[in-house]
Amino acid sequence: MISNPENSMHEPTAHQNHVVPDQSPYWNNGVVSCDTREGLAAINGPDAELVIWQRTLPAGLRDWISQTDVDHLPYLRILVEPDGLPPALEPLLDEFGLPADDKRDLLIEDIDKLVRMFADITRGEFVDVRLERIEHDACKKFHRDNVEARLVTTYRGPTTEWVRMDHAEHALRQQKQYDGPIEHLGEHDVAFFKGSRAGTNNGVVHRSPPIAGTGATRLFLCLNKRTSVSPDPEDIL
């Protein structure tokens, strides 16, 4: 674990827990854990709603990300072919002043592998990649994404929060007043989940962690299939 002030926001409260396979009643109700990148393919199972790859980044990469000046963390969106991430991403990171060194190469390599895996699992010709510095409350309301499937991971700062199926409708109705259990991804975990367009059980209810006023900064990666609102392959948003 990185030792910095943001980690205090990862500590479980009475209503925030890491999911443990042997203890969670939701574990066998659409949620799957894996310990390899390839295990994310379980999302294609008919009963799978959420697959969590519980992983640990190399210590050098973790420390580098946590210590990087927030002004150099990127906020970008690109549409790439499965094998086209590095040449598209590198010049953009240069524009943000993110130093080109072996640690940055590790970050690009990690994202590249996730992009390739996402494209393979979803059979997409393009991947919509968002790599975002977030210093505010992003998607702060509990919601289901209007997509077939989405992959997310947080490289820095508090991680995505979600609720179990038996609490989902309550969370959607209550929003800020919801006082039921809230799960959150472990540090650097990768989540592959189905959205409301998957035609299964309506998708996983989740939200971005509330961080406004805390001083925390997130570095968040989100992968989607190409849609009508995706940028053109050569355009950057």
Image (cartoon, rainbow, N blue to C red):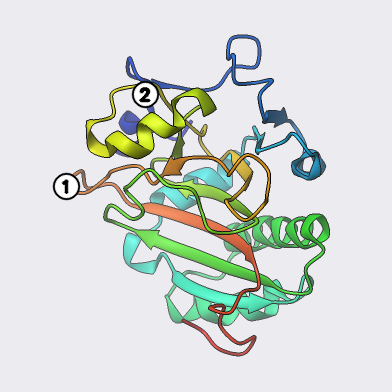
196 and 73: which one is in front?
A: 196
Considering only order in the chain, which callout, 1 or 2, is on the residue closer to the N terminus? 2
Q: Residue 203 at what x, y percent from top left?
A: 58, 43
- In the rendered image, is residue 132 in sight? yes
Q: Residue at x 51, y 74 (%)?
A: 77
Residue that numbered label 2 is attached to: 11
Residue type at the position of mark 2:
Glu
Is 8 drawn above or below residue 100 in the view shown? above
Is 2 drawn above or below residue 108 in the view shown? above
Q: Secondary structure at mark 2?
A: loop
Q: Residue at x 59, y 50 (%)?
A: 195
Q: Residue 218 at what x, y percent from top left?
A: 38, 51
Q: Secondary structure at mark 1?
A: loop
152 with respect to 49 (left or right): left
13 and 47: which one is in front?
A: 47
28 and 202: which one is in front?
A: 202
- 10 Å crowding of disc 1: few (<14), some (14-19), many (20+): few
Q: Residue 109 at what x, y percent from top left?
A: 70, 60
- In the rendered image, is residue 4 in sight? no
- The quarter of the picture where residue 188 lies is top right
Q: Residue 135 at what x, y percent from top left?
A: 29, 56
149 with respect to 212 (left or right): right
Residue that numbered label 1 is attached to: 213
Between the C-alphas of marks 2 and 1, the distance is: 18 Å
Residue type at the position of mark 1:
Gly
- The quarter of the picture where residue 219 lies is bottom left
40 with respect to 71 (left or right): right
Q: Residue at x 59, y 14 (%)?
A: 25
- 10 Å crowding of disc 2: few (<14), some (14-19), many (20+): few
- The quarter of the picture where residue 49 lies is top right
Instruction: In the displayed orientation, state which residue is furthest to the top.
Output: 23
Q: How many marks?
A: 2
